[in-house]
Amino acid sequence: MTFENLLTETDNNILTITINRSDKLNALNRNTVKEIGQAIKNAGSDNAIKAIIITGSGQKAFAAGADITELVVLSVEEGKILSKEGQDVYRSIETCPKPVVAAVNGFALGAGCELSMACHIRIASENAKFGQPEVNLGLIAGYGGTQRLIQYVGKTKALELHMTGDLINAEQALKLGLVNYVVPQDQLILKCVELLEKIKTKSPKAITSVINTINAYFDNNTIGFATEIEEFGKCIATQDFKEGTSAFIEKRKAEFVGK
Ligand code: COA
């Protein structure tokens, strides 16, 4: 199957999905997120695929967030639908019965950071940067990031990162427990493959059981994800959101008024 915004390649039973919008720092427009969902679904039922790597094209970005130019035009209801769609695709990655590794090759911001957090393992190149900068747009994360960041770094840092919009580098992400390994960029895919080759020698059924069981620890948190959708929608109704997104497009600093 071919995709508009993804490249896919299978080698030695490992599928690599590459987000292919490098001129936009692999920003995740709606269609790209849908395509990722489709690629994961296909891989889940394909016996020839034993493991999956998700990465971004180019050397600068894994994914620099949701495509801001698409967000600007949304109504509150459309915003909530977008958030739900994103959450559902990311949940399908998290619950994929085969191991999914994010090869974070640069900026992993907003929906890009959320995408990496939906994967079972994150390996970052030394130049990677992580963050949830949605507040700079008068918005919050909408694809599960408010819930998953807490799982990896705890409430203390999750609140700080979501409220400041600050970016952290790969070493900081490693110290916080957000990523599993940091490696030089030219060794990123090699390291992912090495780890997956080890996992591939184990019983696939046992690996699926590991995924299901560890996910189950967090599974009673439907209220958190539902609240994220509601609050994401509320933000879209604000004057601050219009100001934040306009400021990004016009390449200037936003002036928020709290309305
Ligand atoms: N949505 C849409 N387009 C985006 C984007 C996004 N999330 N992130 C980057 N782009 C586009 C830029 O608009 C620019 O397009 P242009 O060449 O047509 O002007 C191109 O990608 C390159 O980005 P640019 O900002 O020029 O690169 P930079 O190196 O100066 O800055 C970032 C890199 C990641 C710091 C900056 O692009 C950024 O802040 N992006 C938005 C991050 C964000 O807020 N994500 C959450 C979205 S909800």
Image (cartoon, helix red, strand yellow):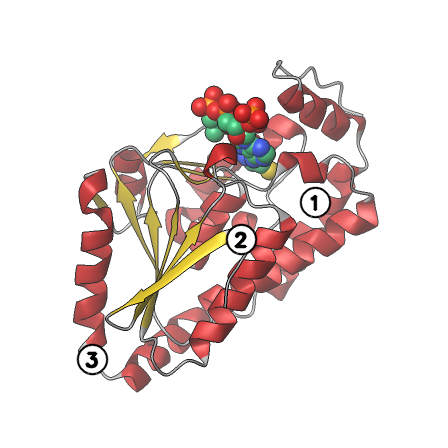
Residue type at the position of mark 1: Phe
Residue at 61 percent of width and 31 percent of height: 135
- Res. 99 image quadrant: bottom left
**Above-or-below relation of 93 to 131:** below
**What residue did someone put label 1 on?**
232
Q: What secondary structure is marked by label 1?
A: helix
**What residue did someone put label 3 on?**
202
Residue type at the position of mark 3: Lys
Q: What secondary structure is marked by label 3?
A: loop
Residue at 61 percent of width and 39 percent of height: 67
Q: What secondary structure is marked by label 2?
A: helix
Residue at 24 percent of width and 52 percent of height: 189
- Res. 224 image quadrant: bottom right
> Nearer the N terminus, badge 3 or badge 1?
3
- Indicate which disc residue 147 carries: 2
Residue type at the position of mark 2: Gln
Does residue 202 appear anywhere in the picture? Answer: yes
